[in-house]
Amino acid sequence: MDTLIELYDDRAIENILAPDMFRPQRIVYLCSVEIAQNRNRQDKLRSFFLRRGWEPELIFMEASLFKADRILRQLLTIGEKYSDCAVDVTGGSDAALFAAGMFSAQTGAPAFTYSRKSNRFYDISGAAFADNLDCTLSYSVEDFFLMAGGTLLPGRVDNAILGKYLDDFDPFFSCFLRFRRDWSDIISYIQRISPAEYGQIPPMSVQGKYTVKGDHGSRNSANEAALKEFARIGFIRDLTIASGESVSFRFRDANIRAWLRDVGSVLELYAYKACIDAGIFNDVISSAIVRWDDTLGHAIVSNEIDVMAARGVVPLFLSCKATDIKTEALNELAILRDRFGGKGAKAAIITTEPCSAAARHRAAQLEIAVIDLEELKDSQLVHRLKVIMKAQS
């Protein structure tokens, strides 16, 4: 097979799995007029394959989405020009699939498909090379964005350094569970006595009043027990508390400083470590910022995914919430999963609050797993991630 015919699909991974697995000399995409004229999208696909270590010839042919007879004529023309061709019938419109079947029957061109359920390719007609063949591909988080026309940007977290802190994340989360009800005030207090200094290296040493201004004119006093716990787990040092008067301490380093000033970091870091501890993912990223480069004429936008992991050809999108689960958050997560992961992608939302029945119902409708406070208290996060990914515990 020198030429592979792909029926272009809205789910990006359907357009690259077979090409990346069999690596033909040439790929002909039968696609909509928007894709046929979208040079940026085409260049993204070229960049994706080049990143994977090969450089096939890519041909994009405008095709009807609903006229099987027109698609068949195009397929016959392609077959005449490239006699050693095969057709992948995994994606595409119903009309395209019907035409591909007729094309294979009339010309004898091999046809095959891919099953996500079994993660295998199957011979449909004359494609012995794809018969019951395991898909051995594995993609990084960045690969999933690139194949869908997006770009992975640097997020709030330097993932290169997280490995050095893995032993800190469980004690940090245990501290959160102990002081969960007061966590927002605790972090707000630390923010007040260690203000951000943009454009400069922030000081590690802190000295402030015991009571500071809170939100909406309130007063926020130091939580002595929490500060002592931060000192016990090694996040702060040289802690001195003069009750009712002042507080002073030194952050262990700049990363710890950032995490103790961000109310949501503790859950995101805990979820990141859970993905690592699960031992089933080939790539994990915290704070994945994705820019939607390919928006077909719409304004370029970006979104942040709290934690994203990849297991072979299946991505997992995790949203971490220190509040009740809102419908908007579920909808956004579903959109990101479908846009950059496709039909087989997984998504879960993790909340440090009990999840309401209404939120669970909406999550179930969107096929989003819910992991709430009780499961976090019972240290069930790693197990749930394995269940979601259908991996053996």
Image (spheres, helix red, strand yellow):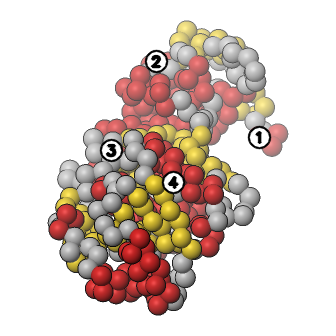
Q: Kindly identify which numbered label has been placed on residue 215.
A: 1
Q: Kindly identify which numbered label has been placed on residue 281.
A: 3
The type of residue carrying mark 4 is Leu
Secondary structure at badge 1 equals helix
Whether residue 285 sits left or right of residue 103 in the image: it is: right
> Which marked residue is nearer to the observer: mark 2 or mark 4?
4
Q: Kindly identify which numbered label has been placed on residue 234.
A: 2
State which tag comes first along the sequence, 2 or 1. Answer: 1
Q: Kindly identify which numbered label has been placed on residue 232.
A: none
State which tag comes first along the sequence, 3 or 2. Answer: 2
Give the vertical position of 130 relative to 381 (above or below).
below
Residue under the image location 26 percent in, 80 percent down: 108
C-alpha separation, residue under disc 4 versus residue under disc 3: 24 Å
Residue 358, horizontal then vertical, whole percent: 51, 72
State which tag comes first along the sequence, 4 or 3. Answer: 4
Give the vertical position of 218 relative to 233 (above or below).
below
The type of residue carrying mark 1 is Asp
Which image quadrant is residue 89 in? bottom left
Give the residue number, with chain letter if any, for mark 4: 45
Q: Which of 221 and 314 is in front in this view?
A: 314
Secondary structure at badge 2 equals loop
> Which marked residue is nearer to the observer: mark 3 or mark 2?
3
